[in-house]
Every structure is written in structure tokens, then in C-alpha cells.
Amino acid sequence: MADMRVERSGDKSVEIREVPEGDVDRALELAYMVFHDRPEKEVREHHHTMLLGCERLAAYDGDVLVGFMAAHRFRLSVPGGDLPCPGLTFVSVAPTHRRRGVLTGLMEEMLRRTAAAGRPVAALWASESLIYGRFGYGSATQGATIEIDSTRPLALRVTPDGRPLRLIDPADAPAVLGPHHEASRALRAGRPTRDAYRWREEWLREEDEEDEELSPPRIIAVGKTGEPLAGYVLYRTKPEDGGGPLKVPGLVQVQELEADTPAVAAALWSCLASLDLTGKVVARGRPLDDPLLHFAADRDQVRVTGQFPALWLRLVDVRAALTARAWAAPVDLVLELADVRLPANAGRFRLTAGPGRAAYEATAAPADLALDVRDLAACYLGGTRVVELVSAGLVEERTPGAAAALDDALRTELLPHTADEF
């Protein structure tokens, strides 16, 4: 691909180009400075290796690397399908070059390359949510932090699955858990693929990057050896701290819990809440429709302590994205779409879709809904309701009932969700 230049004030220009392997460490140093981080050698080596497997763009002011962006080569589950989806990460701009068009140049070049490669969507996790809406990203999934008071047995309204629990060696996790995880991706939209490297280096690393006091990963599965798993939980623990009245009980930190049925989930949550020498279970990034929140008998014992935007989605090729997903109900609407970054998406289009079919074609007919591409992205996976955006003044409903009709068509059985941060 030809390099792209982003002009800024002054005599020089900033050049956007691919990052050779020899500049990966320079890019990391920039990112560590921007995020005020000082990782140990092992973490630096991990980041270096990870970035070698990513697509990489940087902004250079002469020979100085002043901006950086990388993209994982993911596929993302969408309702009824699976799409190629670059996962943006390590987005950073030197403090000396803020507000000079560097980030805009990086984002626009990444969007251009994504479109040219035939990838209909892109995704990221935002360190600052204010930034990415102006580039067409919408908050497409939400995460909840759930805390369980495990100083007493977990009270449940369902009977836990009676099949045996067994420990899984983390070294065997990609082979043992991988098929179950891949099958679960088809049930919830918004989940990126996870290969053996990502299992090993992101989920099963001996030390947790954010908290060195946490134990290595532990895995408990439901089902006999040799039989398909019915579910599993991946967690870490922290020992109790202090003594007497100041003693802090041990902590169980849940990283991932997958279950085929509510009874299987109940067995895993009960096991976590009964671990010796612990008094609290914390699960960050659970889906908002987690069955635990319904089958817990005491909601004073099981509490939601936080909710946050998780995966941000960008529709790069709106037609390809809309015609690739499944639709829950028939819909025939004209959308007037704004997209200042990718003008090919902008205009008036008739969406005609339903179970097993979808078309999206330019039209001169009056619009039923007028919206920005970021808001369509927020609704695309089924995690945000169009009617709520109408109520918020972000989507204009020109035909009464149009927003509700689009919501009915976009609806999914389970809310989109992912805990895969990148």
C-alpha cells in the first residue's frame, strides 16, 4: 500500500506507514509513555511477540515515531454468522503531537485498509470513550461487574448440575476448552476468535498483568473426563490479608465462566463461592443478562457493582455487514445514514430483511429513520435498542414505529457480549 501523509501546521508533514519489525520496540515505548505504564521485562517481551502477529501502522515525524496503532486479525461473531474484524489495540499518540491530526490520520488509514481488504467491521476497547465515536465507533456491548458475598453458602433458586467437577491443567486448556468456547461464540454476538496463542499468552499466563498478587489461572470444568464439557470456569485467587478486625478475606476473581445450562452455571458459581479461605467472588465483564442474576435467591448476596461499555464496533462496509447478519423479523425501512469518515456508506438506503434474507440498496425514497453510522453500529449486534437512541435525540424517527420495527428485526435471543479485551 502507498504511504499516506497527514499535513499539519509547520514545515513538515507526518507520514503514516507500516511499522517494520525493527520499530516494534519503539512503538511499545511510545505506548508505555502514553498509558503511563512501566511493565517488567517478561510483559514487554509478551507485547513484542503479540505485536509481531498484528497489522501495524505508525505516524513518523521525520525519523521519530509519534503515533502508533496495531490490529489483531480476528473474526467476530455476529447474529447468525462470523465476519473478519480487525481488533484495534495500542492506539497512542505522543504528547508532543496531540491535536495535529495524527490520530485522525492513523484511524482513517486503518479504515481505508480495512475496507480495501473486504472486512465489513472493525472493533476496539476504548480507554477513553469520548474519542472513538467521532471515528464512527459505537458502544455495541456492555459488561457488568458482579460480586458475591461468599462468607456464607450461595443461595440459589435452581439445583446445581450433579455431574462431577474436575480440574483442568492450564496447559491443556486450548485443546480441552477451545471447542466449547468456539461453540459458545455462535450463541452470542460480539465475540472474537481465540487461537492457541491467545489462549496461552492472554488468558493462561502464569502472572496477571494487572495484579501480581493473584494466583496463576485455575480451571474447573463440569463433566467426566472423555465426555464433552458442559461448562467451565477460569479464575484466579488472592489470599486473605491482615489479621483481626482488619483482615480482608481471600478473593476469587472470575475471568471467564461458560455453561450450557443454568444448572451447570449454578454448579460452577456454587463451587467458586465455597472455596476455602475466601470471602468474595468478583466477576468483571459478565453479560447484562447473566442467568446468575435471576437464579440467585438473595440479591443482597449477589450484587451488580458496575456496568461499562465493552466492545466498540465500527461498520466499515454497511451493506456487507447488514446483509451478512441474521434477522429476527421482517423489516422494510429506508435509512438515511451519515458517515463523515467513509462517504461510501453515507446516503439513503432501503433495508429489506427478514429470516433468511437481507438487501440494502440506495434509494431516493423518503427516509423512515435518520442516524449516524456510530449509532447503527451500536445497534448492529442487538445490544442497543434504536428506540432508546430516538428517545435520547440521537436517531430521528420520521415514520412512527420505524425504530420499534428495526429493533424487532435486530433482536437476538442473548445480548451480545465479550470479555475478550485487547
Image (cartoon, grey):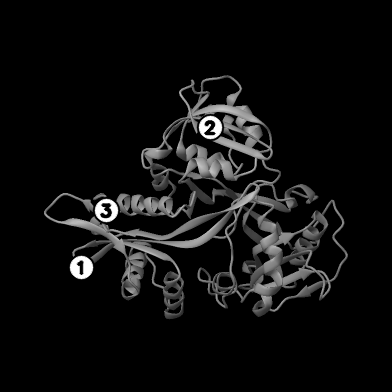
Mark 3 neighbour class, 10 Å CA radius: few under 14, some 14 to 19, many 20 or more = few
Q: Earlier in the sequence, mark 2 or mark 3?
A: 3
Per the image, the residue denoted by label 2 is 389
Residue at left offset 59%, top offset 65%: 194
Give the residue at x 50% y 71%.
209
Q: Secondary structure at mark 1?
A: loop
Q: In this picture, is 172 found above or below 293?
A: below
Name which of mark 3 and mark 1 comes first in the sequence. 1
Sequence order check: which comes first, mark 1 or mark 2? Answer: 1
Identity of the residue furthest to the left in this view = 11
Kindly report the distance in space between the C-alpha atoms of the residues bearing marks 3 and 1: 18 Å
Q: Which residue is mark 3?
A: 98
Q: Residues within 10 Å of mark 1 (few under 14, many from 20)?
A: few
Residue 134 in percent (x, y) is at 38, 42
Judged by depth in the image, the label closer to the viewer, 1 or 2, is 1
Q: Residue at x 67, y 42 (%)?
A: 412
Q: Position of residue 68 (x, y in %)?
A: 34, 61
- Which of labels 3 and 1 is toward the front? 1
Q: Nearer the viewer, residue 33 or 114?
A: 114
C-beta proximity under 8 Å, tags 3 and 1: no
Q: Which mark is residue 63?
A: 1
Of residues 272 and 324, the one nearer the viewer is: 324
Indicate the amino acid at tag 2.
Leu
What amino acid does circle 1 point to? Asp
Say above or below: 359 vs 49.
above
**Mark 1 → mark 2, Cα distance in angstroms:** 45 Å
Taking depth in this image into account, of 380 and 209 the one nearest to the observer is 380
Amino acid at dot 3: Arg
Residue 4 in picture, x, y percent from top left = 26, 55
Quote the CA–CA distance across marks 2 and 3.
Answer: 31 Å
**Residue 172 shown left or right of residue 5 in the figure:** right
Residue 300 is at least partly visible in this image:
no
